[in-house]
Image (spheres, helix red, strand yellow):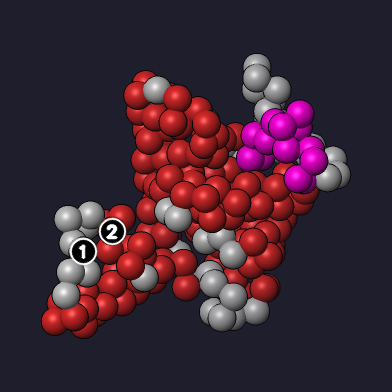
Amino acid sequence: MFILISYFQPHLKLKNYRNFYSKKVLCSLSTCILFTGCTALGPHSGTLAQRSSKLSNGLQKAYAVSPSTANRLSPMIIQSADRYEVPPLLIAATIRQESNYNSYARSSGGAIGLAQIIPSYWQQSCPGNLSDEYTNIQCSAYILGHYNQIAESWFKASAYYNVGPTGYKSSFWTRHKAKKYARSVKRFEKSLKKEL
């Protein structure tokens, strides 16, 4: 929990015992605020079918995804989110940012599929056909979860998703680009949350 305090308010430090409890309350409040949106589709908020239906409706309203595509992809997003403990809205927003829900998207840099995975880089960690929607979404969740473990921040994990941890640290301009990307993903996440 101290991580949340230092991320949101780096000037706060646990200097003495007297301040410990007030900071613990602040930290608990921060945790509640951060994860309130995620619990709407989290593992304890209903069956897979119920959560998938809710996400599907949100995708259709927020991102104008066709009903057939939203219905097909929503269970994959929920299952991947549960497996790798990644907020489902973050996965959905990442897909919106990367491909606008185009399963056949390919970038000039060799990234493929819904979540624009680069096979030459991720094939070892994400075995299987990355052109397959389910495999691509699973890999996206794995990458976001992996980067969150390194960064201890979903925002930074999203930035790493765009340029990698090494790229993020390489220069001001690359970091600026990655943060801009992460802010865009966050906006997509918020617009989806409003429609749930």
Task: Tell which circle, 1 or 2, labels the residue nearer the N-terminal end.
Answer: 2
Work out whether 192 lies above or below 169.
below
The amino acid marked with disc number 1 is Lys
Dividing the picture into quarters, in which one does residue 15 lie?
bottom left
Seen in the image, is 150 located left or right of residue 120? left
Dividing the picture into quarters, in which one does residue 127 lie?
top right
Residue furthest to the top: 108
Residue furthest to the left: 18
Which residue is painted at 28% across and 72% down in the image? 27
Q: Residue 6 has which mark?
A: 2
State the image coordinates of residue 78 (x, y, percent, origin top left).
63, 63
Relative depth, front residue between 12 and 51: 12
Count numbered badges in the picture.
Answer: 2
**Quadrant in which the C terminus is drawn:** bottom left
Which residue is painted at 85% across and 44% down in the image? 128
State the image coordinates of residue 98 (x, y, percent, origin top left).
56, 35
Work out whether 37 lies above or below 132.
below
Q: Residues within 10 Å of mark 1 (few under 14, many from 20)?
A: few
Which residue is painted at 26% across and 78% down in the image? 24
The amino acid marked with disc number 2 is Ser
- C-alpha gap between disc 1 and disc 2: 7 Å
Give the magenta-colored segment's residue range: 114-126
Work out whether 23 lies above or below 156.
below
Seen in the image, is 26 located left or right of residue 62? left
Looking at the rendered structure, the secondary structure element under dot 2 is helix
Between marks 1 and 2 in the image, the one whose residue lies nearer the viewer: 1
**Quadrant in which the N terminus is drawn:** bottom left
Examine the residues drawn in magenta and state their main secondary structure. Answer: loop
Q: Residue 49 has which mark?
A: none
Residue 110 seen: yes
